[in-house]
Image: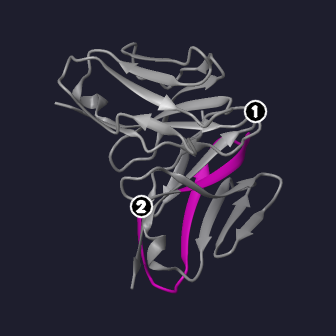
Amino acid sequence: GENVEQHPSTLSVQEGDSAVIKCTYSDSASNYFPWYKQELGKRPQLIIDIRSNVGEKKDQRIAVTLNKTAKHFSLHITETQPEDSAVYFCAANPFGNEKLTFGTGTRLTIIP
Amino acid sequence: GAGVSQSPRYKVAKRGQDVALRCDPISGHVSLFWYQQALGQGPEFLTYFQNEAQLDKSGLPSDRFFAERPEGSVSTLKIQRTQQEDSAVYLCASSLASGLNTEAFFGQGTRLTVV
């Protein structure tokens, strides 16, 4: 089955700087890679996703890159703001396999 | 409702007690998932329904765990003879279609504490 590793587990960034979170996956059949943001005590919410037919996707201050050969994908947040503080989870699943395999999460803290 | 709704939000159970957790998915969503999230960890897959059919239950940790979705809408996760290691947040998610990697919308979860 799929195995997803996520680094770092914690990340502190000065407000306005960029944050990068990296994930690797094991199943070469995986072709969908969502990123979820979870604030304390709240539900995970999708912030961006990417499919394996593209290498990069951007939505305002958030971008995701995918390297299929190396089997890793990364989340990039630019111009970080205090409201970006949360736990971020990457996930992966192969086409047609409904279940998501999640990473262990990154606790991002934005320092004002 | 506008989103996935779970009840109760919090449940304290004595060890050995049976519990039932409810999930109301977004109306019209075909796929429904249950995940278990231990403290400080990512969600881990338990089971998946496509309409009323349970297509994957490979993540259920033991035969004490049982899930159903009899009419293809509301789902219930039942845990029999709860044990302390069952303490976790149980998340339900739904998505519009199956087999197309569409966005999964999560509920706020039920925090189960077994004492």
Quarter that holds the C terminus of chain A: bottom left
Q: Which mark is residue B59?
A: none
The secondary structure making up most of the magenta span is strand
Q: By what rule are the colours in the image chosen?
A: one colour
| Mark 1 neighbour class, 10 Å CA radius: few under 14, some 14 to 19, many 20 or more | few
Q: Residue at x 42, y 61 (%)?
A: A9
Q: Residue at x 50, y 51 (%)?
A: A44
Residue closest to the eye, B29 or A102? B29
Q: Residue at x 68, y 75 (%)?
A: A60
Q: Is residue A79 above or below residue A71?
A: below
Q: The magenta stretch spans which residues?
A: A10-36
The residue indicated by pointer 1 is: B99
Q: Secondary structure at mark 2?
A: loop
Query: Nearer the viewer's eye, disc 1 or disc 2?
Result: 1
Q: Secondary structure at mark 1?
A: loop
Task: Please identify the quarter of the rendering in which residue A27 is found.
Answer: top right
Is B29 one of the magenta-colored residues? Answer: no
- Tally the numbered discs: 2
Q: Which mark is residue A9?
A: 2
Residue type pointed to by label 2: Ser
Q: CA separation, marks 1 and 2?
A: 31 Å
Position of A15 with respect to A74 (left or right) is left
Position of A23 with respect to B87 (left or right) is right
Is A17 one of the magenta-colored residues? Answer: yes
Q: Is residue A68 above or below residue B104?
A: below
Residue type pointed to by label 1: Gly
Q: Residue at x 75, y 37 (%)?
A: A95
